[in-house]
Amino acid sequence: MKAIKQKLTLLSLLSFLSTVIVLFFLIKEIFILKNSVRLNFIVIFLIALTLLILLIYQYNKFKTAKLILESKILHIESAKIEEETNVKDNGVSFVDGIEVYISCFGILLGSKVIKFNIDKIILKKIEVDSKYICFTYSSNKKTKMIKILHGSMNKYELQNFIERFSYETGIVPILFT
């Protein structure tokens, strides 16, 4: 969440500065009318527009991350994550020691946000074990799987997670013992 906030702040600052520069060139263009100013204005305007689009994207990511944090069901301090980009393809990547927040709206993996049931991302199934929680979801006909190795959780914590997740999402996690 901290990295998302830092990117949002940086993009806000850069967008503001580029907007000020665009306004400066616009005022200069109106009063002086030089061809070289026109080219500079177009370049700075395109940079400002790109920064503004990135700012909007980052702000939406920040809002989703904030929603996940506010409605968290489970927080895992230091998790090991195994991610498959395509379940049939076995494109596996690993990440060690990252903070994970799980809510009914999605998962926050450090600065990566995975939304559920928003923007055509559908949560298909959840598998829970004493050592891991596995989320299978699909977006744009691509099935992805995230396996979060959470360490040791006792049966009470697992059962509480399953009941709360079932209640809030309607999806019943499969429990492996």
Image: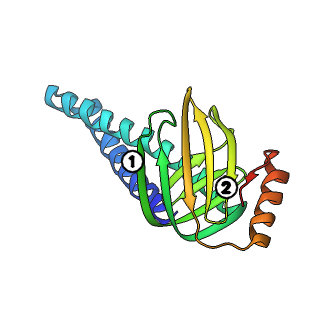
The mark closer to the camera, 2 or 1, is 2
Q: Of the numbered discs in the image, which one, if any, rests on residue 76?
A: none
Residue 138 horizontal/vertical position (percent)? 60, 34
Query: Outermost residue, left direction?
Result: 36
Residue found 30% across the figure and 45% down from its top: 21
Residue 128 percent coordinates (x, y): 69, 56
Q: Which residue is mark 2?
A: 67
Q: Amino acid at mark 2?
A: Leu
Count up the numbered dots. 2
Q: Is residue 61 left or right of residue 175?
A: left
Q: Quadrant of the C terminus?
A: bottom right
Q: Which element is circle 1 on?
A: helix
Query: Which amino acid type is marked by label 1?
Result: Ser
Q: CA distance from mark 2 to mark 1?
A: 25 Å
Depth check, front residue: 158 or 48: 158
Q: Tell me the residue at 56%/58% (across/down).
A: 148
Q: Is residue 151 above or below residue 30?
A: below
Where disc 2 sits, the SS reads helix
Which residue was labeled with disc 1?
15
Residue drawn at 55 percent across, 44 percent down = 145
Which x, y percent locates residue 174?
74, 50
Q: Residue at x 85, y 53 (%)?
A: 167
Task: Report the front residue among 25 and 73.
Answer: 73
* Image-based side of 20 in relation to 103, left or right: left
Residue pushed farthest front? 177
| Scheme by which the image is coloured | rainbow
Mark 2 neighbour class, 10 Å CA radius: few under 14, some 14 to 19, many 20 or more: some
Mark 1: give few (<14), some (14-19) or many (20+) Cα within 10 Å.
many
Query: Between 45 and 8, which is closer to the camera in this rendering?
Result: 8
Residue 22 lies left or right of residue 157; in this view the side is left
In this picture, residue 170 sits left or right of residue 140: right
Q: Position of residue 153 (x, y in %)?
A: 68, 72
